[in-house]
Amino acid sequence: MGRQRVAGCIFLFIGLLFFADSFQLSWGSWAEPGPAPFPLAVSLLLSIAGIIKIVQNQGGGAKEGRIEWRATVRGFLTPLKILGTTLIFILVLERLGYLVATLLFMLALFLWVGRYRVWIAIGLSVAIGVGSWYFFEVILKVQLPEGLFRYL
Amino acid sequence: MDVLNNLVYGFQTALTLQNIYLCFIGCLWGTMVGVLPGIGPVAGITLLIPATFGLNATSAIIMLAGIYYGAMYGGSTTSILMNVPGESASVVTCIDGYQMTLKGRGGAALFISAWGSWIGGTFSVIGVMLLTPVLADLAVKLGPAEMFAILLLCFILLASLGSGSFFDTMPVILIGLLVCTVGIDSQSGEQRFTHGITDLYDGIGFLPVGMGALGVAEVLRSTEENLLRTVNKVRLRDLLPNREELRASWGPIIRGSGLGFVIGLLPGSAHILSSFLSYALEKKIAKNPEEFGTGRIEGVAGPETANNAASGSALIPLLALGIPTGNAPAVMLIALLIHGVRPGPLLISESPEIFWGLVASMYIGNVILVILNLPLVGIFVKLLRIPFRILFPIIILVCLVGTYSIKGSTFELGVLLFFGFLGYVLRKLKYDVPPLILALIVGRTMELSFRQSLMRSGGSFSIFWESPMALSFILIAVCMFSWNIYRALRPEKASWEKALEEG
């Protein structure tokens, strides 16, 4: 599948999602337009753009525009690892608190993605975790989640 | 006289110890992000937004603007010394800059690049100072129909002049326009696309989308690359250009200043476009164009001056109309909105300290950058030895904390992650992401202008052609749109287009 076709599918999906939802909104009148017409028109244009991209590349796309799936999946691995680790960090942030969650998050990234040795990864994680906590919480007065430390 | 009095007022604001310090920090950080490939000015500005929360709006914008024009200075360093563009606008500098380094004239190329950047930057600040108040006065008189027409033209221009093709950029703009409709409709109070999720009632925030689609996505893309870096050393005494190089660089610097300033006013990747056009112009008018690519100083002086002039003039539409024409001004607009300041026609009259303080700080910043970039070039190059596998977790962490600190909500972090993924996928599919952010920011104004126009005219579309200004903007937009359709349908390029490309 060509890259334009993949992009076309994404555009069509987003366009149709908003297009269908727009019908539940009120239309108003021409003299006093409601919240529906603008997103309806935009989503319709996006859906048309998506269809054009898909139809244009029906033959699988030009050779230079084709996606090498094996290489793409290999290329996606590191970003997916980072996204997955970040998602877990977001989910546990308020329960564990900023300091603990950040230490674990950094450790996971340095070990799993950065491929550092354990002791170096621990050292870097502690330095960044504590340093960032001091910078944001103490210097910039940002309210960070306390989590486990709430009970201390 | 008014301008001079206001400028004095601006210097009084910018010359406080705190603002000089912040301008210095902005310029220093800007140079650093310019030097480091993989972190552009957009990511550089978004990363420092959380650090501005404790500051007032004037100090915040002084620091963030410093990053923006500082990155343009820093971007040339790695282009010249290593053939690695630190910033996309410096791609063209690699061609002759690196060849000069191989010939032992890298120091002179750095000097001329900094000197040209200073002249281009200063020239554009004068333009910002003189043009913005005039444009703002004009903008006060604009009605909703004119505003809608301007924004429509802005999007068509953005898609036509951006780094992708028109039909690749337009869908990304449409996604941005759709994202901005999420939340409670300001006119009817009705919920749109919220599906009962209370976190979506206020709409999708600019900061998580900006930090995700630009910052996180840029990091994800950079983790795929494995750059092998060879750094050429430069000694201080090698920095001075010879008489011939100085004489040859004057013309390109003057032409680059004018060209860059004009291009910077257009929406799209103005700073990138200006450097390429400047290079093409210098090559076209050169006596020996075949020598370009072998280490000509004109190939460094022109583009580097042009991209600095363009980055300065790109602030004019932002400050006068509240319309960001590029991705870095868009992020600066986000920062201003967080500080409760809405740039637009009333900014200069309502918050003169912000506008004139910024203008004065840009004069100061340009001087700081010349001082920073010449003697300290060796230190900045050493930054490239920091492995990216240490940098990327820090960048992601700063994006996360910056987003969390706005509302203290993990939902916003989910939005950041989602748009980080979407931005990364779009980049992988070779689509330009910044237009999405621009559309998200000005989309609400566009919809509001459209609805207000119809309300004012009692439902008649004639309001869009009764105003000569609105009509002319819409006509230009229609012409450009038709031109893009014609170009897409036509299989062969016209002979003059081929000639232009070859030229």
Image: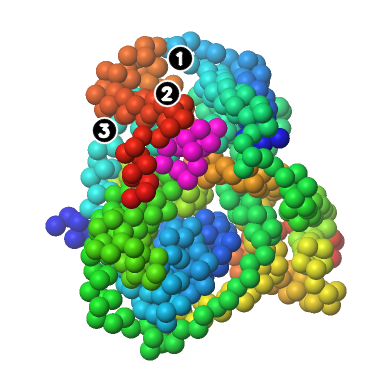
Please state the chain letter of the residue tagged with numbered disc 1 in the rendered image. A
Distance, label 2 to label 1, CA atoms, is 11 Å
Please state the chain letter of the residue tagged with numbered disc 3 in the rendered image. B
Q: Residue at x 80, y 77 (%)?
A: A120
Co-location on one chain, circles 2 and 1: no
Q: Residue at x 34, y 37 (%)?
A: B495
Q: Nearer the viewer, residue A108 or B445?
A: A108
Disc 3 versus disc 2: nearer the observer: 2
Residue A12 horizontal/vertical position (percent): 64, 26
Q: Which residue is mark 1?
A: A32
- Tell me the kind of residue under disc 2: Phe
Q: Which residue is mark 3?
A: B141
Q: Nearer the viewer, residue A151 or B70?
A: B70
Question: What element does badge 3 sit on?
Answer: loop
Co-location on one chain, circles 3 and 2: yes
Residue B43 horizontal/vertical position (percent): 56, 57
Residue B478 visible in the displayed image: yes
Question: What element does badge 1 sit on?
Answer: loop
Question: What element does badge 2 sit on?
Answer: helix
Q: Are marks 3 and 2 in contact (CB under 8 Å)?
A: no
Distance, label 3 to label 2, CA atoms, is 17 Å
**Which region shows up in magenta?**
B159-171
Co-location on one chain, circles 1 and 3: no
- Tell me the kind of residue under disc 3: Lys
Disc 2 versus disc 1: nearer the observer: 2
A90 relative position to B267: left or right: right
Image mark for residue B450: 2
